[in-house]
């Protein structure tokens, strides 16, 4: 239409808009947003996973499992990991299978990528602090600091499964 800044919305755009709304509601509700983070600890890595698909909240990676996961911070193949870590491919393959099962690793066409972000989460900016501005997206009015405290508390309590 003349003077209109937008064209008609097709079914794909409507679906994307609905999915974004679902994501925003999930992110803003509950005690913790979806997070997958890793932190180096003595002898390995500790992963905190609050995503809905997480089989467990905490996972400890020791020894070779931690080495494989760290190596997968950039995309790796099985032959590349075997060369990089100077290790037996069957051992590496078994570790990759466990990490995929735990849903902390992405595997596509024989290439692998670690999904966790490193370290503590930074504070999220409020709408008025966000450098990109606000495009009329309205999240429920709430302070994000409580979920950061809950995140910290959740990361150091409960049971941890070890992967070696």
Image (spheres, grey):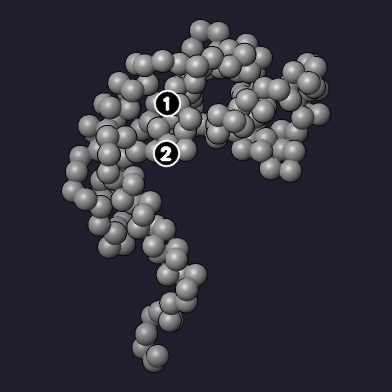
Figure quadrant of residue 158: top left
Q: Quadrant of the C terminus?
A: top right
User: Horizontal and vertical percent for residue 50?
Assistant: 40, 32
Numbered mark located on residue 52 in the image: 2
Callout 2: 10 Å neighbours few (<14), some, many (20+)?
Answer: few
Could you say which is closer to the camera, residue 21 or residue 83? 21
Mark 2 or mark 1, earlier in chain? 2
Figure quadrant of residue 65: top right
Could you say which is closer to the camera, residue 163 or residue 119? 163
In this figure, which residue is indicated by the disc labeled 1?
57
User: Horizontal and vertical percent for residue 100?
Assistant: 61, 32
Q: Is residue 69 above or below residue 131?
A: above
Task: Using the rendered image of the protein, determine whether residue 84 is visible from the camera's viewpoint.
Answer: no
How many numbered tags mark residues here?
A: 2
Secondary element at tag 2 = loop
Residue at 29%, 30% in the rendered image: 148
User: Horizontal and vertical percent for residue 11?
Assistant: 47, 73
Figure quadrant of residue 150: top left
Secondary element at tag 1 = loop
Residue at 67%, 28% in the rendered image: 97
Q: Quadrant of the N terminus?
A: bottom left
User: Horizontal and vertical percent for residue 102?
Assistant: 55, 29
Q: Is residue 135 above or below residue 70?
A: below
Position of 118 compared to 140: left or right?
right
Position of 80 compared to 140: left or right?
right
């Amino acid at each position: 239409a003349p003077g209109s800044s937008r064209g008609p919305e097709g079914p794909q755009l409507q679906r994307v808009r609905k999915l974004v709304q679902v994501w925003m509601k999930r992110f803003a509700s509950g005690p913790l947003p979806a997070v997958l983070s890793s932190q180096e600890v003595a002898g390995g890595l500790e992963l905190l996973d609050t995503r809905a698909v997480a089989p467990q909240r905490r996972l400890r990676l020791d020894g070779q499992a931690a080495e494989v996961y760290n190596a997968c911070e950039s995309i790796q193949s099985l032959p590349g990991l075997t060369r990089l870590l100077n290790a037996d491919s069957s051992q590496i393959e078994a570790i990759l299978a466990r990490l995929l099962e735990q849903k902390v690793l992405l595997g596509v066409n024989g290439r692998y990528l670690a999904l966790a972000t490193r370290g503590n989460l930074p504070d999220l900016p409020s709408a008025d602090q966000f450098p990109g501005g606000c495009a009329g997206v309205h999240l429920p009015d709430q302070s994000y600091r409580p979920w950061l405290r809950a995140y910290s508390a959740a990361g150091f309590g409960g049971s941890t499964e070890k992967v070696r």
